[in-house]
Image: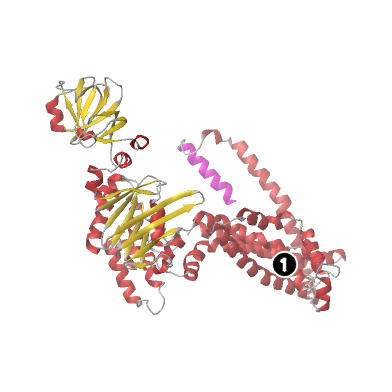
Amino acid sequence: MIAPLKINKETSMSMSHSSTKSYSLQESAITKWTLIIISLLFLLLFLILPLLSIFVMAFEKGWETYIASITEPDALSAIKLTLIVAIIVVPLNAIFGLVAAWAITKFSFKGKNFLITLIDLPFAISPVIAGLIFILLFGAGGYFGEWLLQHNLKIVFALPGIVLATLFVTFPFIVRELIPLMQMQGITEEEASISLGASGLKTFLLVTLPNIKWGLLYGVILCNARAMGEFGAVSVVSGHIRGMTNTMPLHIEILYNEYQFTAAFAVASLMSILAIVTIIIKNLIEWKAKNV
Amino acid sequence: MSIQIQQVSKSFGTFHALNDISIDIESGELIALLGPSGSGKTTLLRILAGLESLDEGVIRFDGQNITNVHPKERQVGFVFQHYALFRHMTVFDNVAYGLKVRPRKTRPPKAEITKKVNELLSLVKLENLANRYPSQLSGGQRQRVALARALAVEPKVLLLDEPFGALDAKVRKELRRWLRKLHNEFHVTSIFVTHDQEEALDVANRIIVMNNGKIEQIGSPEEVYEHPKNPFVYNFLGNVNLFKGRLHNGKLTQGQLEVNVESLHGSYEEAVGYVRPHEIHIEKVQVDNETVGAKIVHIHVVGPIVQIELRREDTGEYLEAEITKEHYKKLIVNKGDVVFIRPKQLKVFIPEDFSI
């Protein structure tokens, strides 16, 4: 409700000082409210209603069933696996993102554009194919399958495979967030730091990192949300072993296919809460970054 | 600290930014690197600071070869064109940075750092703004923070890249004077880059005029202004009127104008005479052939100097003359009058194609 009020205030201001806003952009009140109502209705129908229905369905059979469905061993194992994957993937991608963004923005070298294109690749490839890549590489019939079998190493249908697939899919989130930010900031502050006698590490910790921290955090949050929610790629490599290689999204799908709707929605509600918290944090960060 | 730059060259791809540059700078000098954009002056400054590598040549500080010394060990204070202040740090922390990042062994104790920073802040008259962030400061204030930050590490050389470029005229003048004063107090060897000839003439005690990666002239402000070595320096330092003509028997002729030239002998089909606006004399009657008729197109009276724009009657070329207000009052001329101009102090250069 705050947003429309704000717009209203702006337009009324621009009416009193006609120069502040282009006259041609001022619409009549009817047009304005029609547009606002259409977008609100759309949001209500396609976003808020489905979200609410998740919670309604989850609590359909009461609190006890809800608690029971999210604490039964398979569900707990799915939650645990999801968290483990996120804990491994997000820091790795954060480090990779920093390194790649640093290399791309602070140095000039041949093949830079190629590297940028390569980073975008996971966005362009369907998650299912991303999963299949790892089956082809590390599966029983894959290139390294034989060797892995001989050394008794399991990658597909196990945690390493899930981590690899998630890494692949969430690769671009942090680096994509950092590149434009670091490009905009340039390298003069780093040069100033070096010329004042700071070492490379101190320059990074005291100058670069504070300047990009909000962008980095923003990227981490997006990356985390995707790492926990990834379905396609993980589905291909996980093997759907209950209590072993099921992440939360996979667990929800299995429950749903077995007509355990309440349980499915209970776990789904957990993920939804996660998503809502993520969005709130994301907005807080945006607000904070703007006000620093 | 003295600086020797010996045969330094630098290219960016196919672009020759610096071409065989050699300069000797004595300890305590205040040097201006003057030139148009793309002349290589900033590249030279960055090479001195170690922020840019060089392709050929040697840099010595106090006779010691520092060509391959890392910038953090050069003890150079660098003031960046757009200040490059640390945006997430307060003014105080910005100035303290160079001291705080020292390795533990050489780092002064906290109280000493605070004392030193406060001293510097009072030197740049920013004591009251110690807790502000760079975004809350004006351009002139940021510039002073950048200077204080560079001075905090007690550099042996102070390098300033277009230090006054982004400031408005009045602040610029103030800071110029202040920089000169600062230099008189500290005696740290300082080099600043500028494309503004007035700034170079006003502040520096020696000017290095650069163009296309080469040095055109080195000398005191008076030397380079009064005795430019070549047409480029003449053109770049101050306004100038051109007389393109033929040189024969020590006389430059162009149209109806004939001027005696003492410095050059021999005959050249093409020669260019350079005359500063204040060296053009205006007379109301023609006395000899060393003057030529010109019509006054515009008179600009501001302050003690009167600028007069003229159009030559014979060739139609435009000229600019500067006379004092007193002289102007005595002369009594108006727009549209035809007067006779006499170039005093004509400096003739032969275009290079013909000089061989």
Q: Position of residue B5 (x, y in %)?
A: 35, 59
Tag 1, which chain? A
B18 or B90, which lies in front?
B18
B194 or B128, which lies in front?
B194
Q: Is residue A7 magenta?
A: yes
Q: Give the residue type that dot 1 points to.
A: Leu
Q: Is residue B269 magenta?
A: no
Looking at the image, residue B54 sits to the left or right of residue B195; the answer is: right
Give the quarter of the image for residue B27. bottom left
Looking at the magenta stretch, what is its main secondary structure?
A: helix
Decide: few, some or many residues near mark 1? Use Cα within 10 Å; few <14, some 14-19, many ≥20.
some
B303 or A221, which lies in front?
B303
Q: Identify the secondary structure beneath mark 1.
A: helix
- Residue B69, visible in the rendered structure: yes
Residue under label 1:
A270
Q: Position of residue A287 (x, y in %)?
A: 53, 58
Looking at the image, residue A126 sits to the left or right of residue B249; the answer is: right
Please, which residue is most extreme toward the right here? A258
Residue at the (43%, 65%) spot, across then down = A193
Q: Where does the magenta region start and end?
A: A1-16
